[in-house]
Amino acid sequence: MIASIKAEWRKNRFRPAFLIAAGIIAAVVALLYSVEFYQATHHTSAADASLLALYPDQFVNNVMGAGFPLGAAMALVLGALAAGSEYGWGTMKTVLTQRPGRLTTLAGRVIAFQAWMGILTLIIFGVGAGYSVVIVSIEGHAIVLPAAIDIAKGVGAMWLVLSVSGSLGMALGVLFRQSAAALGVGLIYVTVLQIVLVRFINAFNNGSYKWIANLFDGQNASALLQSFTSPVYGRAVAPAIGAEQAVLVLVAYLAFFLIASAAPLRQRDVT
Amino acid sequence: MENTVIETSGLTKRFGGSVLAVDSVSMSVRRGEVYGFLGPNGAGKTTTLRMLVGLIRPTSGSAVVAGHAPGDPAGLAKIGSLVEAPGFYPYLSGRENLKVVADYAGVTHKRVDAVLDTVELTSRAGRKFGTYSTGMKQRLGVAAALLKDPELLILDEPTSGLDPQGMAEMRRLIRDLGQGDRTVLLSSHLLGEVEAICDRVGVIRGGKLVTQSTVQELLGEEGVLVRAQPADRAEELLTRMFGASAVSRSNGSIHLKTEPARSVEINRQLMASGIEVSELRPFERSLEEAFFQLTGEKQGS
């Protein structure tokens, strides 16, 4: 297992897709902060409230917006590439003819991939925190960070959302044995199909099947991230899905996607 | 220590219920030999090798490779393989790719430089794999197969895509690797390659193993080639001497299935009958002839 983790880490640490994704997610968080800072300092209405939301004590709530759908879509792309390109490059047969068994190899891959999801999460939080410190310094106020437990909760929630989407990408990559189809199907599901289905189910029969819509991973990811909404935006609307339920549903999805990766990898021929 | 490194029994692979890729192959590869797995394209060589390293599962039959079932981690630890085109990460250098493979195999990184040196790729090991030529890719594939210092080396058409010089270098390398106790299973459709390198040969055709023997046995019967004028009279005389079944004629020459030691007698009889002999020499059936005879393929087709 350790050997597999080492190998997976070694090959992913210089992988352009991961490095580019890290750069993009950092740039997006910085851009969002820049736009919000500009709006907050150039509009009179509610400008104070908006500016307060950009201060360090609110940065956890503020960066959660990067998690879904953008962060989730990016995680899905990375997952699909991590699993699917092994088939396209023919590296799957190179890997599987070394010492570790198939499931050990997959376990190493999953652990290294989840570590990358953790790195992306820390980048999001790091850029958010850094930007908020810059803003509060410009405004001449004291730097007050959120409680450590709140930061930990935020990091955990973001990591879970990225991990679920990344694992979906991995499962699709294994299933299709290539990255292109996995990317196409995965992105359509996350950004279009799921949204249309949820709308349809919510509207169908006066919303009596809304509970089904509330089981979709995207709904739960959104609900979990929105549970961190800052009070400075005003009174929050009670979410349809509670944070605890969202966590449970997402963990179930994570387990399902990992099994969906392992089963075909274990059973199928590598041709 | 077991004398057989690979033993298969009725190994069969059927794809999708209809395509019979490998049909009841029972082969055995002995320790320390270089075994040539010979067959035309699509004969089932690669499918068989994939089953031996556990990449695909047989539909029926069994195999023991390096003392273990195919794909067993304990067995894989003793096997180095290059099955079809070498698969590596294009964004990593040759050296980094080998380090990744070494990590998977649980081998120290010190082996990386050693195998790069063996395949003479050290000077280009820092370049990205995606920029490698076909020959360099093949050599890196062999290097990866050598990382574990394996007791069994399985190479699937390692000279595929190489230029003549590259092919010669690769053959020399494989011959060197086959020295000592290491067993090499070499799949190829190149007859000269197998004849030059291998101790024993298995010939596969349409998924079936049609023969398994030493190269010498496969080359088979010795004979005598005669060119003489007039050819018809020469053929008549030789048929009287050796029987019709021992005499055949092609491209103006007569092939006799007999011991080369009888050349003097043949010459004397022909001369005594007033037949002019322009060529009289022993011949061996080439591996190419044996191969085409066994596989039912037409020569030059």
Image: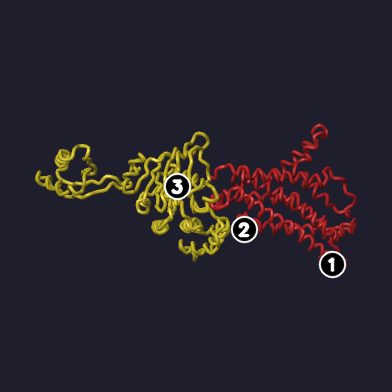
Q: Which mark is residue A6?
A: 2
The reply to whether callout 2 and callout 1 are in contact (CB within 8 Å) is no
- In the image, what residue type sits under mark 3? Ile
Q: Which mark is residue B6?
A: 3
Give the chain letter for red.
A
Q: Label 1, label 3: how many angstroms apart (C-alpha)? A: 73 Å
Residue B180 image position (x, y, % from top left): 40, 58
Q: Chain of mark 1?
A: A
The reply to whether label 3 and label 2 mark residues of one chain is: no
Q: Colour of chain B?
A: yellow
Query: In front here: B116 or A225?
Result: B116
User: In the rendered view of the protein, which quadrant contains the C terminus of chain B?
Assistant: top left
Q: Which mark is residue A138?
A: 1
- In the image, what residue type sits under mark 1? Ile
Q: Label 2, label 1: how many angstroms apart (C-alpha)? A: 43 Å
Q: Residue at x 18, y 47 (%)?
A: B227
Q: Residues within 10 Å of mark 3 (few under 14, many from 20)?
A: many
Q: Residues within 10 Å of mark 1 (few under 14, many from 20)?
A: few
Of circles 2 and 1, which is in front?
Answer: 2
